[in-house]
Image: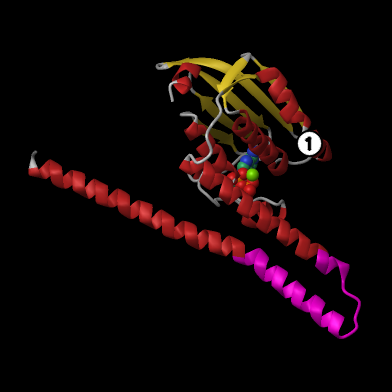
Amino acid sequence: MNPKLENADNEAVIAALKRAEKMRIDFVANVSHELRTPLTSIKGYTETLIEDLELGRPPDPEFLKIILKNSNRLLSLINDLLDLSAIESGADHLQPTLIDLKEFSGTVLDALKQSARMKETEITLEVKTPQLIADPKRTEQVMVNLVENAIKYCPVGSRIHICWEEKSSDGGTEILLRVSDNGPGIPEKHLDRLFERFYRIDKGRSRDMGGTGLGLSIVKHILQRHHGSIEVESALGKGTTFICRFPNPRTLAKN
Ligand SMILES: Nc1ncnc2c1ncn2[C@@H]1O[C@H](COP(=O)(O)OP(=O)(O)O)[C@@H](O)[C@H]1O
Ligand SMILES: [Mg+2]
């Protein structure tokens, strides 16, 4: 082999290894930080409660509520981390199943009705293709994450449209899931990093709403496991559309 080409190959491998190592270090630092914030709050309020009890003062129920809220945050974070690791490593085996999209989407949306009603959000569903072969539990997770985000990050009275359709592509056909909202939109500078773990546009706001910052990265990995992909289109003041591509069912059946 040409020594120049061999050198270039080695350099590319070393650069990729360095990138992977940096990502691992950043991830450990991010996880530690995300865990420390709620734990510090739980510790502080528990200490105050103990002090109050020792001094014969009645415990403040508000403190107990804060402790519960932060415990729930820790639990969601750990559940999302475990989920992400199972999806990424392939430890959970996908169960490709023939899904009736009308019935399936109806059931998934029923579970989100309550939170949509609370924000007076109107959700419409359009099913232009009848079926999909995919893992039902993971496909549900994709829909729930995207629709929950749209409900959370759009103002009261917004509209969300969900559409399933089939598209022809070079490699055959794909099934597309579009989740569109008419919310505030996402500034362009964030779009590239949106699917990274813990990436949030407004950290405080996401945390207040119980977000872990892992939802979109879980969605991305679920699609990758299905040999599909996800992309986002957004216009400030107009809204956001997430487009999930599930590959030709025959492609998935071979994997
Ligand atoms: N439909 C949407 N409209 C506006 N911003 C969104 C939308 N969906 C996601 N986002 C932004 O992307 C960020 C990452 O989303 P996600 O990974 O689900 O994390 P989380 O919801 O836990 O904060 C959110 O914090 C939010 O800022
Ligand atoms: Mg989310």
Q: Is residue 191 visible?
A: no
**Which of the two residues, 219 or 251, is positioned nearer the viewer here?**
251
Drawn side of residue 211 relative to residue 192, left or right: right
Most frequent secondary structure within the magenta stretch: helix
Q: Is residue 149 above or below residue 251?
A: below
Q: Name the image quarter holding the C terminus.
A: top left
Q: Is residue 80 visible?
A: yes
Please tell me whether mark 1 sits on a helix, a strand or a loop: helix
Instruction: Give the percent coordinates (x, y) of residue 160.
Output: 71, 30
Q: Is residue 217 above or below residue 111?
A: below
Mark 1: few/some/many CA within 10 Å (<14, 14-19, 20+): many
Drawn side of residue 187 relative to residue 155, left or right: left
Q: Is residue 143 above or below residue 127?
A: below
Q: Name the image quarter holding the N terminus.
A: top left
Q: Quadrant of residue 49?
A: bottom right
Magenta-drawn segment: 36-64
Farthest bottom residue in view: 55
Q: Residue 191 colored magenta?
A: no
Instruction: Give the percent coordinates (x, y) of residue 20.
Output: 37, 52
